[in-house]
Amino acid sequence: MKENEEKNKNSNEINETGNNDTSKQENNNTSKQGETIDKPQINPGNNVSFNKIKNGIQVEDLDNSLINYAGEILNLINSSPESEVVLNFDWTYDEYQTVIKAIENTYFKYAGTVNTSYSAFDGEEYRLQITPTRENFNKNKEMENLIANAVNSCVYQGMSERDAVITINNYICNLITYDESYGDTYSAFTIGRGRCSSYSACVKAMCDYVGIECREIEGQANGSSGWELHAWNQVKIGGAWYYTDACWNDSTNNEYMFSSTLWSNHQI
């Protein structure tokens, strides 16, 4: 949800500032209104390292035997357009869970999930029925490239954590037009449409890429339509956590930036 009236805009509509929505600001160090943002009086933190933050176990973290299992699964996913493959493995239930979670975290983070069914087979091997698709695998790779390009277009090595988060916030505000019809990261990066969860997911994706700890927060916010479901972020800068709400910053000239305590019109 937006703080003010929802911006159900299209390419021919005029936004609140009187500018056509298609002419978003080029300079990501400025607000949507084109005014320079005063940097908040907080510790700027460390310089960004571009050491990507991993969310959960990755395929590369698996033991060698489990990496081989993951490789077989991925080979089948990529060699067949079918949405379902069946494999027989000599592994334990715990190993199965570990491998599937690693595949999800590594190759399906932004596009779909790995749906599986698991059953005993001939008393020794286990049958794994898996239904990811090659399309989702490729879409995830596309998302990784889109995020990398977005970060590299606005964040640079040596920028402070504070300034990087401001820049990422402004990039996302310039990228997304609020639209309740879309709630995924892919739509935000490809067609520039999304709701509050899209803003928060994009902020996290870009922060993860440059090594800034970031959480997605889900709760409620009290806007023009009363209390409604909402999503925002918490970022760690200089060892301290701060709330930031890119979705509401998009229509309020970055008024919801770097608060150490939750705003009175937000609740978890």
Image (cartoon, rainbow, N blue to C red):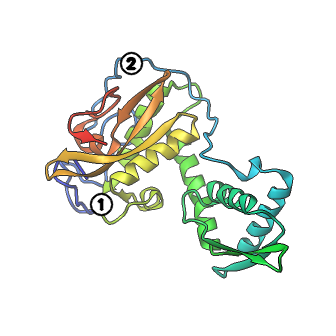
Q: Is residue 246 above or below residue 161?
A: below
Q: Is residue 38 above or below residue 213?
A: above
Task: Check disc 2 and report the residue beneath it.
Answer: 42
Q: Give the residue at x 28% y 62%.
A: 11
Mark 1 and mark 2 lie on one chain; the one further toward the N terminus is 2
- Return the x and y of residue 117 as percentages of the image width and height: 65, 74
Give the residue type at disc 2: Ile
Residue at image coords 45%, 48%: 202
Q: Is residue 13 left or right of residue 116?
A: left
Q: Which residue is mark 1?
A: 179
Q: What residue is rendered at 43% in x and 60% in y?
A: 184
On residue 62, the disc is none
Quadrant location of the C terminus in the rendered image: top left
Pick the front one: 202 or 219? 219
Q: Is residue 34 toward the left or the right of residue 96 in the image?
A: left
Structural distance between the alpha carbons of marks 1 and 2: 32 Å
Q: Where in the figure is residue 235, as x and y percent of width and height?
A: 44, 33
Q: Horizontal and vertical percent for residue 97?
A: 68, 60
Q: Are marks 1 and 2 in contact (CB under 8 Å)?
A: no
Which quadrant of the view contains residue 217?
top left
**Residue at 36% in and 58% down:** 194
Task: Say which element carries label 1.
Answer: loop
Tell me the SS state at disc 2.
Answer: loop
- Quarter of the image where one finds residue 173: top left
Q: Position of residue 10 (x, y in %)?
A: 26, 63
Amino acid type, label 1: Asp
Q: Residue 111, can we see it?
A: yes
Q: Is residue 4 left or right of residue 249?
A: left
Q: Is residue 80 visible?
A: no
Q: Which sits in the foreground, 41 or 260?
A: 260
Compared with 175, 139 (above or below) is below
In terms of depth relative to the viewer, which is nearer, 44 or 158? 44
